[in-house]
């Protein structure tokens, strides 16, 4: 099964080798037919501490690295 890849923005770099990434998705409400924005935060592994708050990044699913980390940073978005 292929691993999911998501795009988001780094919102926190408080912990070593970890970034918090906020991923936003847009969809149409089934009844109201209005476009809705929902966001979710993911904790991702950043081996070299290369990313800062505000950077656009791509994250990929991986095996669990800690209690909360199930994602790893692939690269910066162009």
Image (spheres, helix red, strand yellow):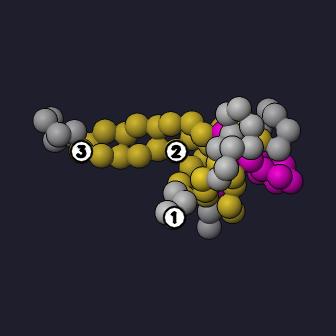
Instruction: Note whether 2 is above or below 52 in the view shown.
Output: below
- How many angstroms separate mark 2 from mark 3 (CA)? 17 Å
Position of residue 12 in the picture relative to residue 50 (left or right): left
Position of residue 36 in the picture relative to residue 55 (left or right): left
x, y percentage for residue 59? 62, 54
Query: To which residue does mark 2 refer?
Result: 23
Residue extending farthest front:
1
Asked if residue 19 can be seen in this view, the reply is: no
- How many angstroms separate mark 1 from mark 2 (CA)? 19 Å
Nearest the camera: 71 or 41?
A: 71
Q: Quadrant of the C terminus?
A: bottom right
Please name the residue shown 31% across and 39% down the image: 36
- Which mark is first along the chain, 3 or 2? 2
Residue 44 lies in the magenta stretch = yes
Pointer 1 local density, CA inside 10 Å: few below 14, some 14–19, many at least 20:
few
- How many angstroms separate mark 3 from mark 1 (CA)? 26 Å
Please name the residue shown 69% across and 44% down the image: 64
Pointer 2 local density, CA inside 10 Å: few below 14, some 14–19, many at least 20:
some
Mark 3 residue element: strand
Residue extending farthest left:
31
Residues shaded magenta: 43-57
Instruction: Note whether 61 is above or below 13 in the view shown.
Output: below
Residue 37 lies in the magenta stretch = no
Please name the residue shown 68% across and 61% down the image: 74
x, y percentage for residue 40? 50, 36
Query: To which residue does mark 3 refer?
Result: 28
Query: To which residue does mark 1 refer?
Result: 2
Nearest the camera: 34 or 43?
A: 43
SS assignment for the magenta stretch, majority: loop
- Which mark is first along the chain, 1 or 3? 1
């Amino acid at each position: 099964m292929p691993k999911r890849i998501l795009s988001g923005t780094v919102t926190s770099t408080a912990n070593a080798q970890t970034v918090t990434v906020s991923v936003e998705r847009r969809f149409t409400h089934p009844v109201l037919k209005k476009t809705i924005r929902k966001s979710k935060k993911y904790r991702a592994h950043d081996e070299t501490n290369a990313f800062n708050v505000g950077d656009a990044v791509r994250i990929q699913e991986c095996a669990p690295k800690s209690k909360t980390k199930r994602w790893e940073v692939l690269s910066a978005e162009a």
